[in-house]
Image: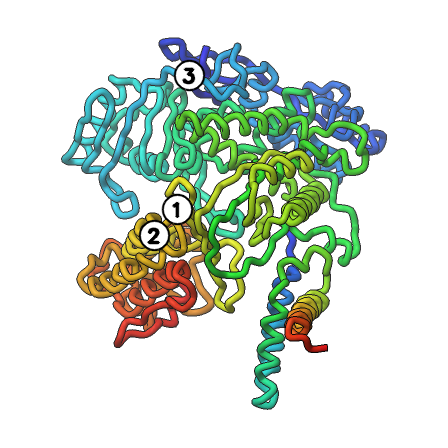
Amino acid sequence: MWILDSAYRNGGVDLWTKDRTVTRIHHDYVPPFYIHFHDPHSHHEMIDVLEERYRSEECTIKTIFGEFPGYSVYAGRDVAEAIEKQANFDADLYNVDVRRDQRFMAEQGIAPCSTENDSRFSPEFTHELNIAEVKVLDDPALSAFCSDIEIIHDETTLLTGQTKDVLADLFFIIASIDPDLILMPDADRWMPKIRKQALKYDLDMPFSRNGKYRQMDSRSYWSYGRMEHKESALIPDGRILIDTEQSFVYQEGGLEGVLMAARISGLSPNLSSRFTPGTLISSYEVYEAVKRGIAVPFRKSDPELVRHVATLQAADRGGMMFQPSPGIYENVDELDFTSMYPSIIVQSNLSPETIEHTGRRGFLPVALEPLLDLRITTKRLKKIDPKFAGIDSILKWMLVTCFGYTGYKNAKFGRIEVHEGITGRSRDILLKTKDIAEEMNFCVLHGIVDCLWVQGAPIAALKERVEHETRLLSEIEHFDWIVFEPMNDGTGAYNRYFGRLSDGSIKVRGIAARRHDTPEYVRDMQGRMLKVIAGAKSIAELEQIQEEVKNIFRDSVKALPAAPSKSMAISRRISRLTYAHRCLEGAAVQAYQKQGVEVAPGMKIRYVVTDARRYQVRPEWVADSFDIPFYTALLEKAWTEISFAFGKEAGPEKNPGNFSHPMAMSV
Amino acid sequence: MGRSFESVRQGVKSIADRWSRTTRALKKEDQQYGEKLVELAKKHSSESFVGCDDPLEAAVFSVLVEILKRQDAIESAQRANGEP
């Protein structure tokens, strides 16, 4: 019995299982929420009413902080919120907002995308999913209709023509091949449109296996300092539909990543593919809590302790960073700690309840340990077999975000002091590593949070000693040469570097080729430059190819006027719709609106700059010209980044008659 | 997350910007020293956050370390040349 989807329907959980054929099994399930009154006597009237009106029983509530007397109430979230208000927030509520299908599976010890005998923490798992790919070839930003659809199953079918006919054919094919999983680029943008058309033409939409759909509303939200946008989604029951374009988990981890995320978090793959790693790790924590009979708080009631601002500032410093001297260095090793922050949580027993009671083992370290062990395994396995790369990537993301989540004010199992404890410990570790390296006569060039760049030998001995003294695992990457880029004021940038690894590949961080907003033409030029310099094993060899690389810049500038406008598109995720100052991004939002395209904060837009000085831009699909001096300046900037590989004297070569465009600095 | 205040490194940058503006008011022959100070203040701004809470303390610490380094280099050179 392999669970492929789950949903809460009609007072119970629908589990869709696959055992050659797909079956829906309904389990009646009305779980209670729990309530603990700080002073039950003052609320005895309400308690009486609860017992009268709903099924309600006295019980002991097990939380991470200990056990408390309380009541289990068999009612929904609306009742819970009403009680909370009536009790003047003098009560702690638990298990109010836990997804009921997830809770059911956690209590039963089962999980999606696995069978009863499977271990959720095994890196190997199988599935026999019947997979189809559906590609709507029209542009979802512009078109409300689908006129061209490609379906890839055993064979590729191309449907084209009037929307009604195309949809009728699509629905017929989906119904007859009856796939368990549909991979569909922009599914969440197309599905609401397809449903609208299906209603209009009175067609029966067969994506859901029982005709039911779950709706997720569109929303814009802040995440890690940037505005994100999530499309509204229409999720079919009993079939997995993955939006391959919008799904972060699918993009990072492929299908294996989505299925692993579902196994780990206890959420249907329909949800695991649509959630961020942060939501997945918090779902994982919820699943683990329910599995252990620990109640999940509805609202967090362990507020931050009152502290003096100086204490606060001393505690909240973040990760350790060294300042590199910009320039090129030969024979450098990068020592990188594996999953440093989660390892610290496990090793140092950091959990909300262990801040004041250090003696006992905390929930967070206990819950994270198997996940961390799994990640360490997949990290090793992916080097032997690339099929583990997707799984490893998702686990890495989940573990990375689990740290940030401890500092989130509404985190169910988070607390800011844990967050600070982790960064504090990480600073000690990096400083200790630096001390060890220097004691062993290594030269420390740079360090950020969980990695250190050093020159010297023998590196294996350093790694061994660091691992022994810190009790953390680490990895070494050898650079034949590495360039640390300067910031505008000439001091070293922490996160902008590139270098040649000993296997001949180039590792790049923070320069144009790696940034998402870089126009294709500029990225392509820098990509070609990186390919050439990848051939140089030393600084001496780099000098020999300097002219060849410079020529790529010269040729790109020369060919620029004849280049296609589309290759100049700048990709941006917009953070707002109105801008206080004139800027290119604001102009792009207006240009989109002028074309009749609805935009929302967090959405990605692509525009071509036609006149930077007058803030004129056009959406990518209508652009037929571009601002040549502006793009020349971008090319110059990209070449400057590379030119540091040839020493400072190489410098950028200005194109005669052109100038560094001031606005290019902000792109 | 949830709350933020200026980091020591950002604070040092603000100080360096202020010192840079102040430098413009110096006499022409003194300006090079003002500019040098700005550069030295930022030299260790990342590392000094380990112990310093006050950006000014961090900036001064960074400048002093660099001055001591320079003094040491001069004294070594003098010793190498046989000067007292």
Mark pair 1, 3: CA separation:
35 Å
Q: Position of residue A28 (x, y in %)?
A: 55, 13
Picture disc at residue A126: 3
Q: Is residue A634 above or below residue A1?
A: below
Residue at 72% over, 60% down: B52
Packing grade of label 3 (10 A; few <14, some 14-19, many >=20) is few
Q: Position of residue A320 (x, y in %)?
A: 63, 51
The reply to whether discs 1 and 2 touch (Cβ–Cβ < 8 Å) is yes
The answer for which chain carries disc 2 is A
| Residue extending furthest toward the left | A161
Packing grade of label 1 (10 A; few <14, some 14-19, many >=20) is some
Picture disc at residue A533: 2
Q: Earlier in the sequence, mark 1 or mark 3?
A: 3
- Disc 3 and disc 2 on one polypeptide chain: yes
Packing grade of label 2 (10 A; few <14, some 14-19, many >=20) is many
- Residue matched to label 1: A506
